Amino acid sequence: MRQLIFAILLAVGAVAGWGKTELPEKSVVIAGYSEDVARERLLESDLQPLEGIWYYPNEDMTLTIERWQPEPSHKIGYRLLLIASDDLELLPGTVIGYIEESAVDNKFHLWLYSERDKVTLSGPLECVATLNKEATSLTFDPRHWEVKVRANFARFLPSLFRGISIIPGIKEEKLPVGFKKIFPADGNGNKFGRVRYL
């Protein structure tokens, strides 16, 4: 029984990607960060489609996604910083998550901090995020685990009915949550509709 539980935990850990990417366990706050600072930084760079100021309607939160690479070998390419929120305890400039590119152009690994101790966020959880074709929305669906374990200790017809079996649960489909881009206006990484020349 212990071996089975250990095998299940290893399988769940492998699927969840534990240990795959090193992330800061706790959030930090970038002092002096505001929407004006974010716009200025974005206007001074060659924007990628993910970069910009986004609105998260589910939490009534405005945030920015900007390029971030603390060291050349680091895989994380973007970080999410809070600009404004109804929650006044969270300070502008709080890093609320990170994004890493994947092998698919419009799919990303998105980590959002899931726990909170007053103004400090911790416990990053991974989601798969999808950027739409126009780069105006970034949707994601947090992972949900549902496992049913059935035990048949009588083991009648053991070749047909296993002693212990794991049955995945079926969950109803829900609309994904996500961010809507509010700056730059055209949403595709160009500055206010300007043509980008190569």
Image: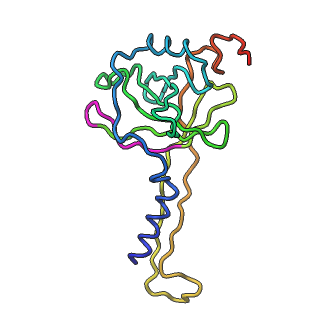
Q: Where is residue 168 shown, x and y percent of the image?
A: 54, 63
Quadrant showing the N terminus = bottom left
Q: Residue at x 43, y 64 (%)?
A: 9
Q: Where is residue 142 shown, x and y percent of the image?
A: 50, 44
The image shows residue 138, relative to residue 18, as above or below, that is above
Q: Is residue 114 magenta?
A: no
Q: Is residue 119 magenta?
A: yes
Q: Where is residue 122 shown, x and y percent of the image?
A: 34, 40
Q: Where is residue 169 shown, x and y percent of the image?
A: 53, 60
What type of secondary structure mainly makes up the magenta span? strand
Q: Residue at x 34, y 30 (%)?
A: 28
The image shows residue 134, relative to residue 98, as above or below, that is above
Q: How is the image coloured?
A: rainbow
Q: Nearer the viewer, residue 176 or 53?
A: 53
Q: Residue at x 55, y 20 (%)?
A: 52
Q: Which contiguous range is marked in magenta? A: 117-127
Q: Residue at x 46, y 23 (%)?
A: 63
Q: Quadrant of residue 193?
A: top right
Seen from this angle, which residue lies furthest bottom?
157
The image shows residue 152, relative to residue 10, as above or below, that is below
Seen from this angle, which residue lies furthest front?
72
Q: Nearer the viewer, residue 66 or 170?
A: 66
Quadrant showing the C terminus = top right
Q: How many circles with numbers are drawn on the protein? A: 0
